[in-house]
Image (cartoon, rainbow, N blue to C red):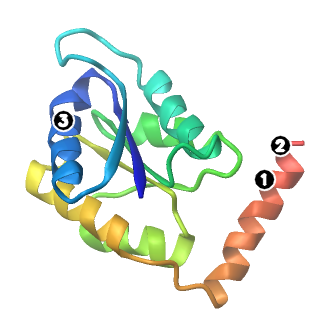
Amino acid sequence: MVITVASDHAGFDLKKKVIDHLEKKGYQVLEGGAQSADVPFNYVEAGQKVAADILEGKAQRGIAICGTGIGISIVCNKHKGIRCGLCNNEYMARMLRQHNDGNVLAFGARVVGQALALNMVDAFLDEGFAGERHAQRVGDITAQEERLFK
């Protein structure tokens, strides 16, 4: 599986740790966003990179990191076909996949620590979509996107 990971400058250090973790687990990683914690980088551009990689078929899932996770998750969700969830614990990361068929995990580098971030990444990538009653809701989201993004 190919995972796209991008961050702004606030998330740069945690992004590097996430990428190292993913590569050790055998994932192919596409990196985007900030190239340093010291040089400002816009979370809007980082979120656009994650969304584009998924929508263009370059990656199957994405991880988006900024200071709080709020801004970058908003950016990702402005793209038709992206279901990004801002998560602060492993349960939310599992439910993002299981109930929402989420394809982008977002979190804040100033909100969660490294161990929790890596546990959320694992939960997000290991969990599958439960389907059944949840498939109807995801279908409703897709139908809403079709109406709004003509």
On the image, the x and y values in percent for residue 112 come to 18, 50
Q: Amino acid at mark 3?
A: Lys
- The residue positioned 16% from the left and 44% from the top of the image is 20
Q: Earlier in the sequence, mark 3 or mark 1?
A: 3
Q: Quadrant of the N terminus?
A: bottom left
Q: For this view, does 39 lie left or right of residue 49?
A: left
Q: Which residue is mark 3?
A: 16
Q: Which residue is mark 1?
A: 145
Q: Nearer the viewer, mark 3 or mark 1?
A: 3
Q: For this view, does 51 lie left or right of residue 93?
A: right
- The residue positioned 29% from the left and 11% from the top of the image is 40
Q: Which residue is mark 2?
A: 149
Q: For this view, does 94 lie left or right of residue 59?
A: left
Residue that sits furthest to the bottom in the current view: 132
Q: Quadrant of the C terminus?
A: top right
Badges 3 and 2: C-beta atoms under 8 Å apart?
no
| Secondary-structure class at tag 1 | helix
- The residue positioned 57% from the left and 56% from the top of the image is 83
Q: Earlier in the sequence, mark 3 or mark 2?
A: 3
| Secondary-structure class at tag 2 | loop
- CA–CA distance in space, label 1 to label 2: 6 Å
On the image, the x and y values in percent for residue 21 come to 16, 51
Q: Nearer the viewer, mark 3 or mark 2?
A: 3
Badges 1 and 2: C-beta atoms under 8 Å apart?
yes
Badges 3 and 1: C-beta atoms under 8 Å apart?
no
